[in-house]
Image (spheres, helix red, strand yellow):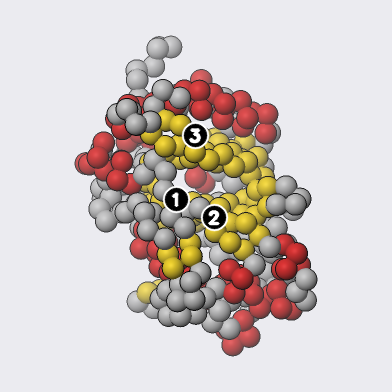
Amino acid sequence: MRVAQSGIFALGTGSHSYLEFDLLAHANPLAAVQAIANLREPRSTTGGVNLVVGFRPSLWARVAPQDAPPNVADFDQPIVGPDGFTMPATQHDLWLWVAGHAYDKVFDVTREAVKALARVATLASEVPGWTYRENRDLTGFIDGTENPSLVVAPEVALIPPDQPGGCGSVLLVQQWTHDAAAFDALPVKRQEKVIGRTKGASVELDEDVRGPQSHVSRTTITEGGEERHIFRRNTPFGSASAHGTMFIGFSADQHRLARMLSRMAGAEDGIRDALTLYTTPVSGSYYFVPSVEALRAFAAPDDDG
């Protein structure tokens, strides 16, 4: 029986590190997968730290074609709305997410991972994340209100176990910077219309009140009369003077993620997400996050046994 990487659903961690790597020119993709698979060994994840790893979809399909979900593409083209608003494509090869309750533990595991991968990949991006007021983003609104419960989340986030890539997940990673001064200058009622929810209790506004341009309206994906959810693990990042949100979205398929981005940019119907007037995407990558068993198939035997 296959199981998902446990860190996907490990809620409550307050310290995070998001790492993206590019393969060195001479590196064999198989060697890179093996190096990451060995990070899953217990000696690398002690101290209550979770480690979740993902791969560029085309890289994983090359190394493990039998375990690659079909029709999952790299984020290799920017998404451009009719008014020129652009979500950049900054696809990298490898992704690591280190999360724990104490940043010293996260820091140590992050350094170990960078060192272990140095022979096959170079660190392209490192973003530390943290929780804010328990579950709010830096706009002051609750983040992830629409997240499914942990009972339902696996159905939303994971590919069915009987399909290629079973118990893996398609991941979208984006870094968004905030124009905090502009958003904070809005009256709260206007902020609520931008988001589509009340700021205090996160109650969804009626559709005729929030309007089709609200963030809630743009990111709600309905197909065949059924709402298609994703599982978000977003965190804030940055300093008091420059900050934003790391969007971390897991899904059982890529289609709903791609359609969400298209709707936010206005590429689907010409209506741009009002929140994008106050926050700017600076990165965008898709990754495939394989099951524990698929990853272990590439790990070296345990020397401690």
- Quadrant of res 106: top right
The kind of residue on which mark 3 rests is Leu
The kind of residue on which mark 1 rests is Thr
- Quadrant of res 182: bottom right
Q: Is residue 207 left or right of residue 59?
A: right
Compare residues 260 and 117 and report the one nearer the observer: 117
Label 1: element kind: loop
* Vertical comparison of 96 with 138: above or below: above
Q: Are marks 3 and 2 in contact (CB under 8 Å)?
A: no
Q: Is residue 289 left or right of residue 12?
A: left
* Vertical comparison of 251 with 260: above or below: above
Distance in Å between CA atoms under marks 3 and 2: 17 Å
Q: How many marks?
A: 3
Label 3: element kind: strand
User: What residue would you read off at disc 1?
Assistant: 90
Q: Return the residue found at the far top.
A: 304
* Quadrant assignment for the C terminus: top left
User: What residue would you read off at disc 3?
Assistant: 123
Distance in Å between CA atoms under marks 3 and 1: 14 Å
Q: Are marks 1 and 2 in contact (CB under 8 Å)?
A: yes
The kind of residue on which mark 2 rests is Val
* Quadrant assignment for the N terminus: top left
Distance in Å between CA atoms under marks 1 and 2: 8 Å
| Numbered label attached to residue 61 | none
Q: Earlier in the sequence, mark 3 or mark 1?
A: 1
User: What residue would you read off at disc 2?
Assistant: 282
Residue 105: percent from left, percent from top: 64, 28
Residue name at image x 38 percent, y 54 percent: 75
Residue 230: percent from left, percent from top: 47, 60
